[in-house]
Amino acid sequence: MHRVALSLTLLTLAGCTVDTRVRKLERSVEDIRAYQREQAESIGLLDSEVKLLAGKIEQLEFGGRARGGDISSLKQDLSALRSKVPPTLVPAAMLEEDEVWANGLPAETAQIFVDALGALREGRFPDALPLLQAAAEQADSSDKAGVILFWQGVAYDGLSDNKGALRSYAEVVARFPKSTRAPNALMRQADVLVRIGDSALAKDSLRKLIKDYPKTAEAAEARDKLKTIA
């Protein structure tokens, strides 16, 4: 009788532990989503400022009512704003995270990598790609190369080079499955596959993401995305 009571107690405690872990995981996922929403709102505000300022410059130039110096100053402000708003396909929150993460790289590699991220932020994909390739070669023997390869995939994405993007994302997952960017590499791999019309392989990528990284925010997103792919 005592053994039965003890077993029931242990099962109850185990259930409580699991419930607690689930609640913590749900809170973590919600925190990540809240952060992503904040980032999206910030980028949206910056984008609105860019459009407003660009409109003012166009109006002044068309009307010819401003001095050259005034327009030049406005254009400088516009350039500064645009440098803060990366293109839509460049994940802004991850970009900011990895600009800080770069501090853990050797000095020379870090400089090349940060320069590459700066180019991506400004949408200069042709400039970013060779820098990322150089940084990846220098970090090839380190697990940190996985993060650099992820951004190499983003650069290929920006150049509409689907093969290059798929190759880079696949390499991240195959060689560096524990990389912080591996789940997103699978997500972006699925996006490219959908873009080129291979829905079956896209679904496989999303299922692998859910299976291998079930506790990530990307896994939750993948579950939703699976429902939308025909």
Image: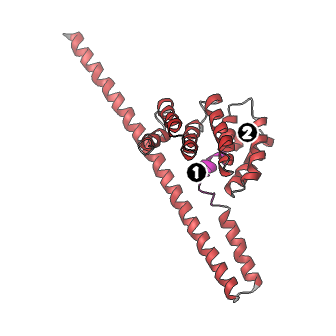
Residue situated in front as seen by the camera: 146 or 202: 202
In the rendered image, the quadrant that contains the C terminus is top left
Q: Residue at x 65, y 44 (%)?
A: 162
Q: Residue at x 70, y 35 (%)?
A: 145
Q: Which labelled disc corresponds to residue 105?
A: 2
Q: In the image, residue 193 lies at what x, y percent? A: 56, 41
Amino acid type at image mark 1: Ala
Q: Is residue 135 left or right of residue 63?
A: right
Q: Is residue 101 visible?
A: no
Q: Residue at x 74, y 86 (%)?
A: 67
Q: Is residue 10 left or right of residue 82?
A: left
Q: Which numbered mark, 2 or 1, is in the foreground of this view? A: 1
Q: Element at badge 1?
A: helix
Q: In the image, residue 217 lies at what x, y percent? A: 48, 41
Calculate the distance from the C-alpha at mark 2 to the C-alpha at mark 1: 20 Å
Residues tagged 2 and 1 counted as in contact (Cβ below 8 A): no
In the rendered image, the quadrant that contains the N terminus is top left
Q: Element at badge 2?
A: loop
Q: Which labelled disc corresponds to residue 93?
A: 1
Q: Is residue 139 visible?
A: yes
Which portion, as a residue range, is magenta? Answer: 84-101
Residue situated in front as seen by the camera: 121 or 101: 121
Mark 1 is surrounded, within 10 Å at the Cα level, by few (under 14), some (14 to 19) or many (20 or more) other residues, namely: some
